[in-house]
Each structure stands twice: as structure tokens, then as C-alpha cells.
Image (spheres, rainbow, N blue to C red):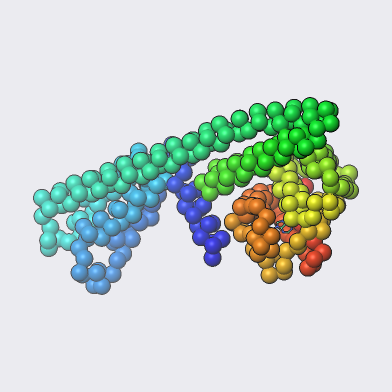
Amino acid sequence: MEELWFKFKSYLSKLVYFQRRSRLQRYLFPVVITILVLPLIFFLPRQYFQFINSQTISFLAFVLIATLSSWYGGLGPGLFATLLVTIISYFTVFQLDLAHHSRTGDLIIAYIFLIVGFFISVVSEARYEADLQKDEFLALTAHEIKNPLSVIRGFAGLIRKKYKNLGKNKLAHYAEEIDSQSVKLSELIDDLLDMTKIEIGKFVYKDELFNFSSLMKEMVTNQQMVNSGRTITLTCCDEKIVRGDKYRIGQVINNLLTNAIKYSPQTSPIKVSSKCHREEIIVSIKDSGIGVPKSEQKDIFKYLYRSKRSKQGKIEGLGLGLFISSQIMKHHKGKLWVESNRHKGSTFFMQLPKNY
Ligand code: ADP
């Protein structure tokens, strides 16, 4: 239910975010829905609708058309729909109730149409502008927070090296802690930004050919460097070229790796392997951690879901990483799933078609 609601909200947001539609599309939209909706009024079985006159029926149709048009296209198309429907209604639908027909009455109703349409369009535009500003603010703030973070990381690295050389391991450890907490903060900001982008349909993907084995090696080496107490083994197939967004696929692998590290004891090993088939690559990441009960194996890929065990164990997290990862896999026509036995850890699988 929660997932359905999320999907509905993101489809709605995609409909509202019109800045990427061409002008022709935006102005054609009111014409198309007017052609679809207005003629329906003529086919209404009048004997059942005697309580309502034709101006009222066309007013309801008009509100629908003006709202949809301004949602889809913004102020201009909203006003265009208002004018279009008012003029067409005035010369057609208004004339249906000949018994009550009065020219002044019709004109007053047409003015009301214009005023209501104007308000609908302006409110839509104002809401869109406010959302746009919010997005820009978010992106800017994220950028502003990440800049000082990378400086903090740089200096923490310098301090760690210096104190390690001087044999002051405690101080070197403090610097290491500053570094790892800054990385977490930076990942958190990335997740929040990605979520906002997914919700508003602005999560864009590159379409490129890249070397999958090199990407796997790079991701594992990076994690091995920051988690020196771990043994992360990699068995990688030779398959090289895959089509997709290298950065986003790397993000999925990284998410699975960091989870394997986060949800397993500090010194336990992590096994990463990839198998190349004719059409696809299957990656598996195996840990010996807290595992995922069968009843929750589907849920953990949902928006904001965290398993009971991770909450009981007070392991930090937001429940966004796997959701974002499964959205990325969906785009690449791939899959993510988990197999886990109680107290034997979990193995996360990623299936990636070579050409999606
Ligand atoms: P987060 O780790 O920030 O909570 P994720 O979306 O990455 O968010 O993971 C969702 C949930 O899936 C986690 O809260 C945890 O309960 C479970 N999970 C993910 N990876 C593992 C793992 N390797 N072992 C056990 N549980 C896991």
C-alpha cells in the first residue's frame, strides 16, 4: 500500500513537473483534452441530468480541463485552456438550455470561467515556482554542506598520517573517526538528494558502455581501503563491457558492500563474486552478519523500511539505500534480491542485463 502511494505520488510529480516538455506539447495538451472532454457533454443522457443546467456541466468540465492543463503546462497553457474552453462553451454548450437562455447570463458565466481559469493557472504556476526554488535550495545546500565536509576529510587524513608516523595511535584513531563520520554524513546527504530527485522524476541516467569488472574492482578496493580490518575477497568474471549508467551501478554495488560491512561483525569476511552469463551478469555479496528474516526479505527494498533486527541492534540508517538501489536496477531492467539463513548472514544478489 505504502509503495503504491509512493508510486502514485511520483507519477503525479512527474505530471506536475513540466519544464522538460516542449512548448508544442504543452500547448497541444489543452487542445487534446478539450477535444476529449467537451463533446462528452453532448452525449450526456439529459433526462437524468435535468437538475443541472448546461452552464454548470460545462463549468465542471472547464475546471477539469483548466486544472489539468495548468498542471501539465504551467501558466501559459492554463490560460490558453481557459480561453479555448470559454469560447467553445459559449457558442456550443451554453446554447443547449434554450428555455433559460439569456445572453447577459451567458456572458456573466463566461466571465466567471475566465476569472476561475486565471486563478487556477496562477496558483499552479506559483506552486511550481515554489517547488523549483525548494529543489534549487536543496541542491545548493547539499553542495554547500559537502564542500566543508571534504575539507574536514582532507585535514583528518593529514592529521591521521602525521600522528601515525609519530607513533601517537590514539590521536590517529580520533582523526580516522572524524574521517569515517564525515563519509557517513556525505553519503546521507547523497541519499536524501537522490530521494528528492526520484520523487520529482528528475533522477537522470547516463547511457554509456563501461567496463564492469573494473568498476567492481574499484568499488571493492575503495571499501577495502577504508575498512582495513576486514577481508573483502573478490572473484570477478572477465566480462568487460556493459551498457548503463556506470556511476549509478557503482552506487548500487557500493550500497550492498557498505550494508554487508555495517550489518556484520567487525572482523568477519565479505565475499564478493560476479558470474557472467550470455545476457546478464549476476553479482553476489555475502556477509556473516545479522541476516534478514524471510518475512522481511521483500520489505527491505521498500521506501524507508528497516528490519526489526537492525532497529533492535540500534544500527544507524534511514532505509533509503536499498530503495534507491532497486530504482536504479529497475531502470536497467535488472533485479536485486536477498537470500538469508538465520544467524548465517545474508547474500545480496544483483542481476544486471548486459544491454538493457
Ligand atoms: P539503511 O541501511 O540505511 O537502513 P538500506 O535501504 O540500505 O538502509 O537497508 C534497508 C534495511 O535492510 C536495513 O535497515 C537492514 O535492516 C536491511 N539490510 C540491508 N543490508 C543488510 C545486510 N547485509 N544484512 C542484514 N540486513 C540488511
Query: In the image, 343: left or right of 326?
Result: right
Which one is nearer the viewer's eye here, 100 or 186? 186
Decide if residue 100 is in sight here: yes
Q: Quadrant of the N terminus?
A: bottom right
Which one is nearer the viewer's eye here, 323 or 113? 323
Q: Quadrant of residue 240?
A: top right
Q: Quadrant of residue 169?
A: top right
Tag count in the figure? Answer: 0
Which one is nearer the viewer's eye here, 87 or 219? 219
Query: In the image, 310: left or right of 348?
Result: left
Q: Is residue 303 above or below residue 172?
A: below
Which residue is painted at 33% across and 54% down in the image? 64
**Residue 29 position within the rendered picture, expressed as x and y whole percent measured from the top left:** 41, 46
Which one is nearer the viewer's eye here, 332 or 59? 332
Q: Is residue 65 above or below residue 215?
A: below
Which residue is painted at 49% across and 48% down in the image? 14
**Residue 333 position within the rendered picture, expressed as x and y whole percent measured from the top left:** 69, 52
Query: Whereabouts is ligand 1, in terms of quadrant?
Result: bottom right
**Residue 215 position within the rendered picture, expressed as x and y whole percent measured from the top left:** 79, 40
Query: In the image, 123: left or right of 268?
Result: left
Which residue is painted at 10% across and 55% down in the image? 102
Q: Is residue 278 above or below residue 344?
A: above
Which residue is painted at 29% across and 61% down in the image? 42
**Residue 44 position within the rendered picture, expressed as x and y whole percent measured from the top left:** 29, 66
Decide if residue 300 is in sight here: no
